[in-house]
Image (tube, helix red, strand yellow):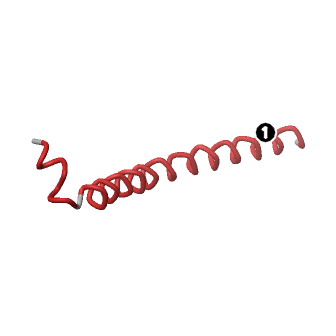
Amino acid sequence: MSEFLRMGGYAFYVWTSYGLAFVLMTALVVSPLIEKKRLIEGIRRKLRRERREK
């Protein structure tokens, strides 16, 4: 098992690549969710303003 984790002397590069891939894939999932929430809130604010103006 320890040899697997050492990756034949390339562990730093391999695990860094896995870590970076994980971070980027997580960002690709979370970013649209945050953007959706922001857009929905903006639409709600706009609708509230329009209702007050009438």
Would you place residue 2 above or below residue 24 in this image?
A: above
Q: Look at the image and tell me in which quarter the N terminus lies.
A: top left
Q: Is residue 3 above or below residue 21?
A: above
Q: Position of residue 30 (x, y in %)?
A: 47, 47
Q: Which residue is mark 1?
A: 48
Direction from residue 35 to residue 26 in the image, left or right: left
As helix, strand or loop, the secondary structure at mark 1 comes to helix
Front in this rendered view, residue 48 or 10: 10
In terms of image quadrants, where is residue 44?
top right
- Comparing 39 with 26, the one in front is 26
- The extreme right residue here reads 53
Q: Which residue does the image show at 82% across and 39% down from the upper left? A: 51
Q: Position of residue 29 (x, y in %)?
A: 42, 50
Q: Which amino acid does the dot numbered 1 rest on?
A: Arg
Q: Residues within 10 Å of mark 1 (few under 14, many from 20)?
A: few
Q: Residue at x 23, y 61 (%)?
A: 10
Viewer-closest of 51 and 2:
2
Report the residue at 13% width, 43% height from top. 2
In this picture, residue 53 sits left or right of residue 18: right
Please indicate whether residue 24 sits to the left or right of residue 49 in the image: left
